[in-house]
Amino acid sequence: MLSGPDPTDETLAERVARGDVAAFATLYDRYARRVYAWAAHLVGSAEAEDVVQETYLRLWDKAHQFDVRRGRFASWFMAIARHVVMGQLRRRTTQQLLIAADEIERVLADAAEPGGDLAEEVWLRERASALLLALATLPEEQRRVLVLAYFAGLTQSAIAAYTGAPLGTVKKRTRLALQKLRDRLQGALGSTWPETG
Amino acid sequence: MKDFEAFGDVADELPGALALASPHRLPSHLRARVLRAVESRAGRSRRLMFDRAWLRPLGVAAALVLAVALVTWNLELQQGLAQERSLLQQLRDSAGQQSVIFEVVDSSGSQKVSLKAVGPQRPGEEPPYGKVYANPQQTQIVAMGGRLPAPDANEEYRLYVTDRFGTTANVGVLHVDTSGFGYLVFDTATRGAGAPYQAARLYLQPRGSNGLDGTLVLLFESR
């Protein structure tokens, strides 16, 4: 049973490494929706459940490998999630990925106000809401390369081929998009935003 | 992609932003399913650790038993060799240059069996022991014993051997000197003399007895 002030992700990860199922459950509550939504858009609801389970089983098995000196838990865990999601995408055609990416881009562009049950997303809300608003205000071509590269896992060469833009332009748009998001988030959240880049 | 590593603080939050905007809701039953899977895995890990916890002392115990067995076996081997050297020396002292004896005993092709003491021993005294040698190229067998108590005047030590065909033969009387050593040479009239033997027995029995009676003193039995 966890008590007192909310433990950090890093503290919870250390407990998971020692076999603490309660700490594991807390990390599930904090991050499962992120993994599920991402996977559901790309592989559908049924397979998204498998992706979430596989991601969390890997967390359980590899928690002892997490080293707080090398970075935040969120970065380490989302790298695991990304690996599992991309593994599922290997069976998809590029056309299927592009359709899914279009849907993700539409959802992000239309999100003037975050939806969903806010009580469920207290922890997510502050940073994710700020990022969502920043994403919605990005130029469409920059948001598009970001979605194709990050969520759908396409290479920059594949994005260039699909969008018809030169490879250098794709690289420039990606970097510009990320820089603008960082600037807007720092403006919105100030010093609370962790600088790891 | 290197840009996502360089902007990790932003990239790591992208799934969170999508989760807020997405119509896909995390199914409530999934939490229980994932926790069940992890608890099952945790249970297996605990069982594995429990099993390993038992394996270690078992391994140590097995290693100890093996070490004790090796030490015991080595001691018995050393003792057997010392006894054999002692018997052969006494045989040379007693038998002089009887060449037939040494053709049997010293031949590399000879087969030998060790006889061990039977029954309770007197406290503080080393138990008696014996050897029987047979050379497949010779008709004679040579037997000897050491540390044998001197028999009463109306008793004698007599050796019986059972050959590989199961036939038991009265080999003869083993005369013992004052040191407890004795030997005998027996001509079986057959080369190899039925070796290897199934059994050899030395009895302390009344003089002139010709059967397996009296007290069994030394025994060899093949396993």
Image (spheres, rainbow, N blue to C red):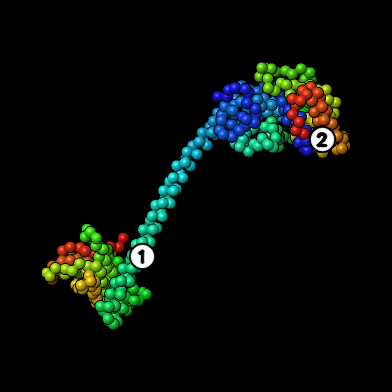
Question: Pointer 2: what residue?
Answer: A159
Residue visible at 32% across and 79% down in the picture: B103
Of the 4 image quadrants, the one containing the N terminus of chain A is top right
Question: Pointer 1: what residue?
Answer: B78
Residue B27 point in image, percent of width and height: 63, 22
**Dot 2 alpha-carbon crowd within 10 angstroms: few under 14, some 14 to 19, many 20 or more:** many
Which residue is at the front of the view, A168 or A51? A168
Q: Which residue lies furthest to the left in this view?
A: B154
Choose top left, top right, bottom left or bottom right for residue B4. Answer: top right
Left or right: where B96 falls relative to A133: left
Instruction: Give the total of numbered labels.
Output: 2
| Whether residue A17 is situated above or below residue B106 in the rendered picture | above
Q: Which amino acid does label 1 sit on?
A: Gln
Q: Do labels 1 and 2 share a chain?
A: no
Choose top left, top right, bottom left or bottom right for residue A68. Answer: top right
Residue visible at 66% across and 17% down in the picture: A119
Left or right: where A187 falls relative to A33: right
> In this orientation, does residue B82 appear?
yes
- Element under label 1? helix
Mark-to-mark CA distance, 1 and 2? 83 Å
The chain under label 1 reads: B
- Element under label 2? helix
Which residue is at the front of the view, A2 or A56? A2
